[in-house]
């Protein structure tokens, strides 16, 4: 399931056997596009493909999570998959506009629909459903998960970089504790 333009983000072993495989449609480009008003180096993060397998390696389901994020900063737009018990959770940037387009199931995603991004927690349930919740919001302001790596420090505990401004150079560690 590795189509051209996809990259493997993670393979997460499930506690009772099987895996979650998380792929992303991804492009790094330095092309200029006058139609999109883009020039210089850009990172394009497209839809996620999540595959759940059983203990024998047989596919149980595949979920295509529609999204599109374009950035001129390598640390903005990455996806951070993790396990919570036997469930897949992904941390990433999302927006209300992209959520609405996903719900419509007919409208294509547009990077222009990331006008007011926020950090989100996505819990994948099966091939057609996932739950999305915003995280890192305080006093009406957004803080942003950024960086290029998720660090697993202990059972149900992770660290990732974050900042109060999207694309900022000053990044601080953000502790993530997975609790029921």
Image: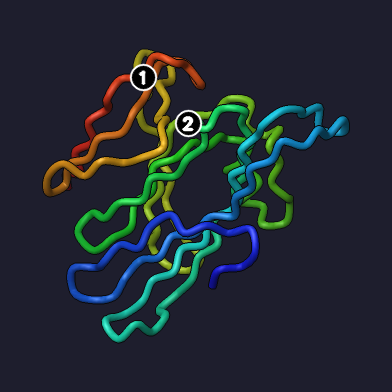
Above or below, comparing residue 28 to residue 170 in the picture: below
- Write down the residue under mark 1: 171
Q: Residue at x 19, y 38 (%)?
A: 177
Q: Position of residue 140 (x, y in %)?
A: 42, 15
Q: Is residue 59 visible?
A: yes
Residue 44: which quarter of the image?
top right
Categorize mark 2 by other alpha carbons within 10 Å: few (<14), some (14-19), many (20+): some
Res 40 label? none
Circles 2, 1 touching at the beta carbon (< 8 Å): yes
- Among all residues in the image, which is located at the extreme right? 35
Vertical relation: 23 (above or below) 61: above
Tell me which residue sits at (40%, 65%) in the image: 21
Badge 2 is on which residue? 75
Q: Find residue 18 and report its horizontal and vertical position in percent.
A: 28, 75
The N terminus - image quarter: bottom right
Name the foreground residue: 143 vs 39: 39
How many numbered discs, if any?
A: 2
């Amino acid at each position: 399931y590795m189509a051209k333009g996809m990259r493997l983000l993670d393979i997460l072993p499930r506690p009772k056997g099987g895996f979650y495989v998380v792929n992303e449609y991804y492009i790094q480009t330095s092309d200029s596009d006058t139609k999109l008003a883009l020039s210089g180096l850009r990172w394009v993060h497209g839809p996620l493909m999540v595959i759940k397998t059983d203990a024998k390696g047989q596919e149980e389901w595949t979920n295509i999570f529609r999204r599109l994020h374009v950035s001129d900063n390598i640390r903005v737009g990455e996806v951070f998959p993790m396990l919570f018990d036997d469930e897949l959770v992904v941390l990433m940037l999302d927006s209300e506009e992209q959520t609405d387009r996903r719900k419509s199931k007919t409208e294509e995603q547009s990077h222009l629909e990331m006008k007011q991004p926020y950090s989100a927690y996505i819990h994948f349930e099966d091939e057609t459903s996932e739950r999305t919740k915003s995280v890192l919001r305080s006093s009406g302001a957004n803080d942003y998960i950024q960086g290029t790596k998720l660090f697993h420090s202990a059972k149900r505990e992770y660290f990732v970089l974050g900042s109060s401004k999207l694309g900022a150079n000053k990044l601080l560690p953000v502790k993530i504790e997975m609790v029921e």
